Amino acid sequence: MALVAVVYLPRTAPAWQPKEAPLMTDWARKVDLANPLPEYPRPQMVRSEWLNLNGVWQFQPGAINDQAPTNQSLAGEILVPFPVESALSGVMQYYPRFWYRRTFTVPIKWSGQHILLHLDAVDWESEVFINGKSVGIHRGGYDGICQDITKYLSENGPQELIVRVYDPTDAAGEPRGKQTLHPGGIMYTSCSGIWQPVWLEPVSATSVADLKLVPDIDRGRLEVTVNVSGPTDGITVHAVARSGTKVVGKISGAPGAELLLPISQATLWCPTNPFLYDLDITLTRGSTKVDTVTSYFGMRKISLGTINGRVKMLLNNQFVFQFGPLDQGFWPDGIYTAPTDEALKSDIQRERAFGFNMVRKHIKVERARWYYWADKLGILVWQDMPSYNSYTDHPQQPDVAQFETELTRLVETHWNHPAIIMWVIYNEGQGQHDTAALVQKVKWMDPSRLVNQASGGEYFAAGDILDIHRYPDPGYMASTNQAVVCGEFGGVGLAITNHTWAPGWGYVGAQDGADLTTRFENFSEQLCDLAQNQGLSAAVYTEITDVETELNGLYTYDRKVRKPDLQRIQAAILAPSGKYAFNPVVAAAKTAGQSWRYTMVMPTTNWFAASYDDNGWSKSLGGFGTEGTPGAVVRTTWNTSDIWLRRTFNPGSLTAEQVNRLMFYVHHDEDVRIYLNGVLAFSASGYTGNYQHVPLNAAGRQALLLNQNNVLAIHCHQTAGGQYIDVGLDERVVLVPPTQPAAVLGTLEIP
């Protein structure tokens, strides 16, 4: 046998290299540099043929009057589709103007077809050049660009693709969410340029342009509209729905017409059973097949209904308490772009593992595969519209027309996802304008979903939802014709050594993971009360992960450390879906005045001890406060900065199980500390807008004396506005156990 000499030559190190951010996720090491984000990018309209253009491109900064650098090598390189400011891009620096360049070759087997170029998101203004000719300009950082580039292509050989980008970030009034050139607080690093996949696909002269799929569970059908590009003469649309290999419905009709595809005895999509049907769409001209795409859909309904006199959000005609985290979609290494599809999926897996059934995607629009995973894993999505001029010292005049344009695109490009059940138009009044008109427009465009006029913003009695923000404790506002939700609460900050972006903050601080867990349990108990007695339909906890200097996450920003105890959080998340009764052990003053000893002068040391002599204190009926304080039942005026209260009670004979079910019934405005027999049993900062049940801590339960006198001692501190304090002690009895699903772990290993 002949021997062949093989010479191994050392590989030349590539010019492009990733950079290192203050934090990196484990997925950063898994990025395929030759083929990043290789998964098919559009799961709801799939064709078999496509070409991924992600990878290392040429790159260089630009200026306002630059000409397209046709047939020129650019000065640097960048990994597409990671934003310019990200470590994974290899640039990690902001430029207001810059250029991308690469070449590609159209596969020979695509000959004779139309070639579509997709740039799924470019922030903010982009212009595409093919072989030196401008194809078009697009403005908008969150919606995809699809251009037919066939006529710009040369007959064979490499084709030149150049993209010009302008991103003003803080210098204009475009929608940009939490991006800023001056990050800090609740604002984060900007995200410029190509940040979602770039790809090609071949189509025939007549092809499916887009789909609109609207489930109707009450009539047992799917409303299917297939819009077609190119000549439609003689074209017939065929839609076939399948469950696995079984055909469950089919229909044919004209392009652009609403086809009523029957789905009898449908399996309904919900977080406990996120069942998806497959959908085949085919275009024919006579007996000739012209185009085929595959898709999927979920049969589910979101609506409002009245239960016990209160307006509630209904899923599939049933009330389900929606509980989920704020999810801002930022990554330390990719900023707006998750390093891999596995990483993108993992945040939703974490949310489901905790037991959350909902997530609020916060003033950011994700790439299509995030919504695919939301559909497949089963989580309800509140989708925010990205705001402009968010919380910066560099405000610009809002581009009102651009906001409406991008809002319209958001709805039209995402309305087929069963997971999305709500459009949130504004966040906390940022750039808020024409609220009622925009609510009406979105409702007209998509009557199958709920519309939230403003999460924590200004309210105009528009849309379906009244959404309040309150930190740290959850809250609510009363409404007679809208579902009431708490769109943000919590914000418990906890820094984990070696897992922080920089020194950071929280709305309130936790000492450690156990303290954070206890605080979350307290919040959850308050939600039980708000859901049952105030009609609250949903609540959003801030937040699933830390984001840069914001340390309010249940996970660290690098996703490597879970802060709270998993099982305790799972149990707490389930609690608000149950129904409860409360048996008074120590009556509160909400329905009848209760006698207390009190003083508004700072008492001596150990005033909270059971043995303390309070005979010198005044005696009167609670509650104590000022008239007009929301939710207060004032029987004794308290208008100083501080008040101290004491009360003796005998709980009688309680079992150990009953003691474990004891909860304070408290309305505090503002900071409160509650002692039981000299032991601190509960404390909270801020204020409540009404009476709420909160659990005693373990030390408080252990301090309780059965069949003996016990002493409740309270200190409440007030700084401004209304004020009030009253405390009772109740036993909570479960009438209906929580019904939400247990955690869905998937394949993710939760640390």
Image: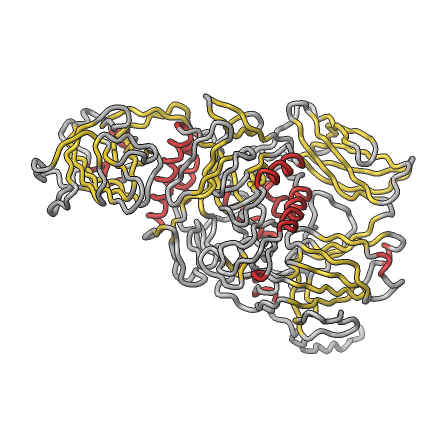
Spot occupied by residue 694 in the image (x, y as percentages of width and height): 32, 36
Q: Residue at x 61, y 65 (%)?
A: 84
Q: Residue at x 68, y 75 (%)?
A: 75
Spot occupied by residue 243 in the image (x, y as percentages of width and height): 69, 32
Spot occupied by residue 57 in the image (x, y as percentages of width and height): 70, 67
On screen, residue 470 versus residue 252, left or right, reads left
Q: Residue at x 49, y 35 (%)?
A: 466
On screen, residue 676 versus residue 118, left or right, reads left
The front one of 176 and 2 is 176
- Can you see residue 560? no
Q: Residue at x 59, y 58 (%)?
A: 339
Which color scheme did the rendering employ for the protein?
secondary structure
Spot occupied by residue 459 in the image (x, y as percentages of width and height): 50, 38
Q: How many marks?
A: 0
Quarter of the N terminus within the rendering? bottom right
On screen, residue 354 versus residue 83, left or right, reads left
Residue 570 is drawn in which quadrant? top left
Residue 668 is drawn in which quadrant? top left
